[in-house]
């Protein structure tokens, strides 16, 4: 999943580069994209809060949940998701020739680590597992690269990858293409006569007994034993002076097997050596262990390199005082250690020197100013490593190469250094500029640049401060490779996988999806234990291999547990779960044997718009519903959850009813708001459409149900057979009696086909079909003992007030429109300081920090404010917000900046100390912060919405004043069931939910059985999930019918919204259509009879981790257009001054850029 190009695009880390790379290439401070690093933890592995093995929350001393990670953890691990790129396109990919010619990206093969050195190579501190153990770094436990045995490439376990006829390595820095293709470029060629490595790679055999051995090349070769090296040679400017040179090199990149009858190829065959995982330490204080390596060219940069590591090329001078050098090598792009380079130069009568002039070498692969080929060459200049300490205790590696007349590479100089987390020893103190840093440090802005001492695995500063010396994957920062990036990525995933939260988190989610929405701690612990141990046993049957994470064991523990197997528990009202709409549709189509007489594909378009769920079309990475969703009604009253019930809003419930009745009546098509499309009404055989079936005609569309009962004339038998295949025999006595009555009645009046289609739909719309537990009547089987609901459940009932008989104008009307920008709006591109700032040039600071996503003066609309009232006298708003600018200048709009979740006043020290009594939980997580924003009670996950609570207070106040049950407050959502409108159960009527398309009612076919549907849902159910479904269906039918009549009384004052006025093009964005529905409701306020209305509309798409500027512009264009239409309509209604629009979002976005966008 992590290497999927589709995931890389979906969560925006594909193409993301490291901070150091962005500084070196662009001169900009661009941070790693945090999107995938956050979601791979929150949603895919460990969740937000620490869990006990039974799935219950771990609580701290304040009885608050303990977070699994912090935002600093996210920023750290985000650096581990840099450098990903798609593979090169292949000729056999399914793509048109024109797309292939245009360089279409390869979205089929797993991503690779980019060869452009975009991968962050600095240390990465792991998560706190919450078990009292110290945090681990990625790479802990691996050997130092400098401690690998000499000629490790010939040691047992050494690995080689088959490259075929392409000599370019895929796991390390690529060669310059011209050098690689050059026929005279020197290669490390293996001798077929004397090389043991050749024999292993060739793997020759004589398959036909002819005496002619043939190589049998394998894609991966691992040496089974240590091999002897073959051949000694001297390096020259054109390569080794002998044919065999294995004993003269430190490490190969690619080895070559020349064409021969044995290889069976006319071209050479190449294998790439894959060095095993190893690490280097970030800091070293012994200057004798390091020397400067330098890029060639007048503008070349320099770095410190450990002398033992093969990271640089050999540059030999006539003597040590010389400034001119020449490259020598054994093979193309050869890397050697300092000591090997020194020996080589001396062997040919030359020396290593502090050179300043070194020509590029085609044969040795050196180049100027490219991220290909051999970048660095050894010098004999000393260097030292320092530590830069930031104000929050993070550190960066600084290379002091002042002995060279060259700057340090951007990744290791003060301006472009990457800061990473370390664990400070003792009291966690570190050098601070406020204290003058330390005697061993110098103050540099907000940072301390410090000399260091390294001893016993720790880094010491001035003897007073210390931290463990962290490891980094690979040989050094000098020569990072794709190979080391892959090793580190595996380590990050392993680190997450072995977090103690994984087992209970995965167990809980899987049980919720497969068995019950509210699993018991005992069941969770059983599954978590099976996941961890890799074993599960039941009744003498053993499952699993014993390996950690074995899914066979975990799945067996899920399905074979008594809570999943017990028939008694199916009668528990809280056991089981609601069924997902898509699964209900597919179950219905398959069980009723949907088929056609000709071969054709099933097409179910726009199901997400109809029923809220569609295959491969999740609205976000959070899926179609949240695992913590608790609908108002019996589920919320029981303090439980029902995730799937989030898809039971009235528009979705009615669309489901219409789709079920349509496919039962007509077959699969668009007739009667069906699940199909118009294309299903065409008869197709071999070519053009031959026949078209009109809705309501005697001829039926091609796709029809093929299921038939065994006895048409026996209603009891027909219902029994349908009950078995659709509900597993769980129909209640009341439902069964009603359905049998419907069948018998229709059988006599309309015939058996119509009778069957009616009860097929009835069972698929029953409460029993919707839930997995037994949804029996709330009394016994006698009708007099069954508890019935009102036509509309009491907690959902419409308001009845005295003046409802006549449409008396509502007086003193007021409305709040809560416009939610979902995803986290980039407020730093909406409101920007421009001029007249009392604290310096804030716009210059803004542009410096925002770098490539900053908006300049000409991209902003200036607005003036009164001097002394704000930090600046002139601000700029996004150029798309022309309507907002006008409203601001008219005194009708205001900006509230620096607003966010808050429990109590908090200081930076409180935040750094993780004071859970003051820090809102799960900051920067979309779902929790959307809830916090819409409740204004971040500390209470079960708090009701801010507008819902406001409505409750208004209605209770009105009741006290008038003494009757009149409600003056009403709420409407035009998108889903938002937290903002949720009030306390039983106090106010639940918010009406509409769609942006308006009122969705029952189709003609559904209305024919409406009275039976309502009768079927009238008895109260013992299942909280079936009862919730019945509540939603009953209220949706009744309330939608009532609203539909009332909203047709008056049309909009300005008519349908068009921009410009003389254009036939409608204001067609979804947010515009939502606000149009709000305006329609306000227009008919007199018929709806509430004097206080709250509305919820939502504009999606603001999670701009990438494509920030164009995406935000497109969104704000839509928003501004919608606000223009809305404001003009309300002004025409003379209600504008009585309406407040509040724009809110999950949270703001980072001021700094990640290169393509912004993070949380």
Image (tube, rainbow, N blue to C red):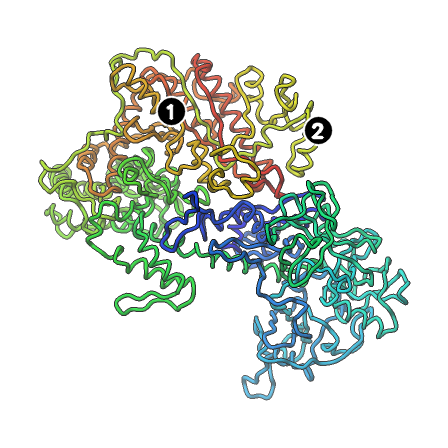
Can residue 98 be seen in this snapshot?
A: no
Residue placed at 73% from the left, 78% from the top?
A: 247
Q: Crowdedness of circle 1 by 10 Å Cα count: few (<14), some, many (20+)?
A: some
Q: Secondary structure at mark 1?
A: helix
Residue placed at 52% from the left, 29% from the top?
A: 1118
Residue placed at 39% from the left, 38% from the top?
A: 941
Q: Crowdedness of circle 2 by 10 Å Cα count: few (<14), some, many (20+)?
A: some
Q: In the drawing, does residue 976 fall left or right of residue 1026?
A: right
Residue nearest the observer in this picture, 769 or 982? 982
Residue nearest the observer in this picture, 801 or 75? 75
Q: In the drawing, does residue 1086 fall left or right of residue 360?
A: left
Q: Are marks 2 and 1 in contact (CB under 8 Å)?
A: no
Pinpoint residue 489: horizontal percent, then vertical percent: 56, 58
Pinpoint residue 929: horizontal percent, then vertical percent: 46, 37
Q: Secondary structure at mark 2?
A: loop
- Image quarter of residue 1025: top left
Circle 1 sits on which residue? 950
Kindly report the distance in space between the C-alpha atoms of the residues bearing marks 2 and 1. Answer: 42 Å
Residue 734 vertical placement versus 893 (above, below): below
Can residue 916 be seen in this snapshot?
A: yes
Residue nearest the observer in this picture, 414 or 1048? 414
Mark linked to residue 428: none
Earlier-in-chain disc, 2 versus 1: 2
Circle 2 sits on which residue? 841
Residue 152 vertical placement versus 875 (above, below): below
Pinpoint residue 493: horizontal percent, then vertical percent: 51, 57
Pinpoint residue 576: horizontal percent, then vertical percent: 27, 48
Residue nearest the observer in this picture, 1115 or 395? 395
Residue placed at 35% from the left, 39% from the top?
A: 646
In what quadrant of the picture does the C terminus appear?
A: top right
């Amino acid at each position: 999943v992590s290497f999927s190009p589709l995931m890389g695009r979906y969560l925006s880390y594909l193409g993301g580069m490291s901070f150091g790379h962005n500084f070196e290439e662009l001169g900009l401070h661009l941070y790693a994209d945090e999107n995938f690093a956050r979601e791979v933890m929150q949603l895919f592995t460990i969740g937000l809060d620490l869990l006990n093995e039974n799935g219950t929350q771990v609580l701290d001393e304040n009885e608050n949940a303990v977070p699994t990670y912090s935002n600093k953890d996210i920023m750290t691990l985000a650096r581990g998701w840099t450098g990903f790129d798609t593979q090169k396109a292949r000729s056999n990919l399914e793509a048109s020739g024109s797309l292939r010619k245009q360089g279409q990206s390869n979205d089929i093969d797993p991503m690779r680590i980019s060869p452009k050195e975009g991968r962050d190579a600095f240390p990465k501190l792991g998560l706190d597992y919450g078990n009292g153990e110290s945090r681990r770094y990625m790479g802990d436990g691996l050997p130092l690269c400098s401690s690998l045995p000499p000629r490790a490439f010939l040691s047992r376990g050494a690995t080689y990858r088959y490259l075929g006829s392409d000599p370019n390595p895929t796991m390390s820095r690529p060669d310059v293409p011209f050098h690689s293709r050059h026929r005279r470029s020197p290669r490390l060629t293996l001798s077929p006569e004397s090389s043991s490595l050749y024999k292993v790679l060739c793997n020759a055999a004589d398959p036909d007994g002819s005496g002619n051995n043939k190589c049998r090349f394998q894609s991966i070769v691992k040496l089974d034993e240590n091999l002897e090296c073959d051949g000694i040679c001297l390096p020259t400017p054109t390569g080794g002076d002998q044919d065999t040179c294995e004993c003269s090199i430190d490490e190969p990149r690619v080895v070559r097997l020349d064409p021969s009858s044995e290889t069976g190829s006319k071209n050479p065959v190449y294998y790439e050596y894959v060095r095993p995982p190893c690490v280097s330490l970030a800091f070293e204080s012994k200057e004798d262990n390091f020397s400067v390596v330098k890029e060639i060219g007048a503008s070349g940069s320099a770095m410190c390199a450990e002398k033992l590591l093969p990271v640089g090329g050999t540059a030999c001078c006539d003597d040590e005082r010389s400034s001119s050098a020449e490259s020598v090598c054994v093979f193309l792009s050869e890397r050697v250690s300092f000591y090997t380079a020194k020996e080589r130069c001396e062997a040919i009568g030359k020396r290593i020197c502090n050179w300043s002039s070194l020509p590029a070498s085609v044969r040795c692969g050196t180049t100027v100013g490219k991220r290909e080929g051999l970048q660095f060459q050894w010098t004999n200049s000393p260097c030292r490593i320092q530590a830069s300490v930031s104000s929050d205790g993070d550190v960066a590696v600084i290379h002091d190469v002042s002995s060279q007349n060259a700057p340090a590479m951007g990744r290791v100089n003060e301006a472009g250094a990457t800061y990473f987390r370390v664990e400070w020893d003792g009291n966690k103190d570190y050098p601070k500029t406020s204290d003058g840093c330390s005697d061993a440090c110098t103050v540099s802005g907000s940072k301390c640049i410090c000399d260091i001492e390294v001893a016993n695995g720790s880094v010491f500063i001035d003897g007073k401060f210390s931290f463990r010396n962290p490891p980094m994957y690979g040989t050094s920062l000098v020569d990072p490779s794709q190979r080391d990036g892959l090793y580190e990525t595996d380590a990050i995933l392993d680190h997450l996988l072995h977090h103690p939260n994984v087992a209970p988190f995965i167990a809980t989610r899987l049980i919720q999806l497969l068995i019950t929405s509210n699993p018991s701690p005992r069941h969770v612990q059983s599954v978590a234990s099976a996941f961890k141990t890799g074993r599960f046993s039941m009744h003498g049957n053993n499952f699993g291999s014993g390996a950690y994470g074995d899914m066979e064991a975990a799945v067996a523990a899920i399905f074979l547990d008594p809570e999943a197997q017990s028939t008694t528990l199916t009668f528990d009202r809280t056991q089981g779960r609601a069924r997902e709409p898509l699964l209900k549709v597919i179950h219905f189509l398959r069980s009723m044997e949907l088929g056609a007489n000709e071969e054709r594909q099933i097409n179910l378009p726009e199901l997400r718009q109809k029923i809220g769920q569609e295959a491969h079309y999740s609205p976000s990475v959070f899926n179609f519903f949240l695992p913590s969703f608790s609908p108002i009604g019996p589920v919320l009253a029981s303090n439980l959850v029902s995730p799937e019930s989030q898809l039971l809003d009235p528009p979705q419930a009615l669309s489901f009813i219409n789709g079920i009745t349509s496919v039962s009546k007509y077959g699969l098509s668009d007739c009667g708001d069906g699940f199909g499309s118009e294309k299903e009404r065409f008869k197709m055989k071999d070519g053009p459409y031959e026949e078209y079936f009109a809705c309501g005609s005697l001829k039926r569309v091609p796709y029809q149900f093929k299921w038939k009962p065994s006895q048409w004339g026996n209603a009891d038998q027909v219902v029994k057979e349908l009950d078995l295949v659709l509900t597993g025999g769980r129909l209640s006595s009341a439902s069964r009696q009603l359905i049998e009555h419907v069948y018998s009645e229709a059988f006599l009046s309309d015939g058996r086909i119509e009778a069957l289609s009616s009860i097929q739909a009835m069972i698929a719309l029953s409460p029993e079909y919707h839930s997995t537990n037994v949804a029996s009547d709330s009394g016994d089987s006698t009708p007099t003992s069954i508890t019935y609901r009102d036509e509309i459940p009491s907690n959902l009932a419409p308001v009845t007030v005295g003046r409802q008989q006549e449409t008396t104008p509502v007086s003193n009307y007021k409305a709040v429109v809560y416009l939610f920008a979902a995803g986290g709006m980039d407020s730093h591109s909406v409101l920007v300081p421009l001029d007249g700032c009392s604290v310096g040039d804030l716009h210059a600071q803004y542009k410096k920090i925002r770098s490539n996503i900053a908006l300049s003066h000409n991209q902003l609309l200036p607005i003036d404010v009164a001097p002394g009232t704000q930090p600046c006298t002139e601000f700029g708003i996004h150029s798309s917000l022309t309507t907002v600018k006008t409203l601001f200048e008219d005194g009708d709009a205001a900006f509230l900046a620096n607003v966010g979740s808050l429990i109590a006043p908090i200081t930076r020290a409180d935040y750094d100390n993780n004071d859970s009594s003051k820090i809102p939980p799960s900051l920067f997580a979309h779902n929790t912060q959307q809830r916090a924003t819409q409740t204004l009670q971040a500390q209470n996950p079960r708090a009701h919405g801010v507008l819902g609570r406001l409505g409750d207070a208004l209605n209770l106040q009105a009741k006290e004043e008038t003494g009757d049950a009149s409600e003056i407050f009403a709420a409407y959502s035009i998108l889903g069931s938002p937290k903002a409108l949720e009030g306390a159960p039983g106090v106010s009527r639940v918010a009406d939910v509409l769609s942006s398309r308006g009122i969705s009612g029952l189709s003609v076919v559904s209305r024919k059985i409406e009275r039976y549907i309502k009768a079927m849902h009238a008895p109260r159910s013992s299942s909280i999930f079936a009862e919730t479904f019945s509540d939603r269906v009953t209220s949706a039918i009744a309330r939608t019918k009532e609203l539909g009549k009332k909203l047709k009384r008056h049309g909009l004052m300005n008519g349908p919204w068009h921009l410009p006025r003389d254009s036939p093009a409608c204001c067609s964005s979804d947010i515009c259509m939502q606000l149009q529905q709000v305006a329609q409701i306000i227009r008919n306020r007199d018929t709806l009879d509430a004097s206080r209305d709250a509305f919820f509309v939502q504009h999606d798409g603001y999670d701009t981790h990438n494509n920030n500027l164009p995406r935000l512009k497109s969104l704000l264009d839509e928003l501004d257009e919608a606000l223009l239409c809305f404001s003009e309509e309300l002004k025409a209604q003379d209600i504008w001054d009585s309406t407040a629009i509040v724009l809110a979002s999950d949270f703001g976005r980072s001021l700094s850029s990640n290169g393509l966008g912004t993070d949380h």
